Image (cartoon, helix red, strand yellow):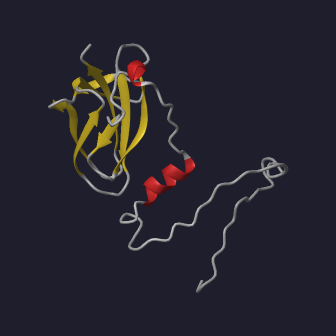
Amino acid sequence: RGNLMRLTLLKGSQRPDPTADLGHHEFTYSLYPHAGDWRQADTPRRAWELNDPLASVPLAKSRAGLDPSVSFISINRPNVMLAALKLAEDEDALVIRLYESRNARGPVSVKLFKPIVQAMECDLLEKAAAPAKVVSGALRFDIKPYEIRTFKLRFKK
């Protein structure tokens, strides 16, 4: 209200555990002043960067086989966030999960460090649902507001 700002860092209830808020707690918080609304300020991305910072491990060029300037992944829409990237559980593929963060829709293009040769949309258990479009080595799909999409990607061996 007016020029007063408050922040509650811990609120413990009495049920089911009256001692749940006792002990040592650590918090991370950030004030993020910005112009415009939360979409224009890219607040979901800034929150993700604060709460789950990217960790990288440098490799020698000969070990990695990639030029240091190569982007591992690029997504052409700022409203589409990478939620997961992992090896598939039961086959030689990469699983990528993305979601739309700004209540927008439209075409998306995802490029990885090497060309994709096959993509399948899949469910959260990695069960293939339908073939996905690959154009010039990039995954292409349309996304709806707040939609989550998961794909299995295969690369040339």
Residue 50 visible? The answer is: yes
Q: Quadrant of residue 117?
A: top left
- Residue nearest the observer in this picture, 37 or 113: 113
Residue 44 position within the rendered picture, expressed as x and y whole percent measured from the top left: 45, 55
Quick check: 52 left or right of 126?
right
How many numbered circles are shown?
A: 0
Quick check: 18 left or right of 10?
right
Residue 88 visible? The answer is: no
Q: Quadrant of residue 34?
A: bottom left
The quadrant of the picture occupied by the N terminus is bottom right
The quadrant of the picture occupied by the C terminus is top left
The extreme left residue here reads 136
Residue 93 position within the rendered picture, expressed as x and y whole percent measured from the top left: 34, 19
Q: Residue at x 44, y 53 (%)?
A: 45
The extreme bottom residue here reads 2
Q: Residue at x 29, y 56 (%)?
A: 104
- Image height of 32 relative to 93, above or below: below
Q: Residue at x 44, y 17 (%)?
A: 89
- Residue nearest the observer in this picture, 123 or 60: 60
- Residue nearest the observer in this picture, 80 or 60: 60
Residue 5 position within the rendered picture, expressed as x and y whole percent measured from the top left: 63, 76
- Image height of 46 relative to 75, above or below: below
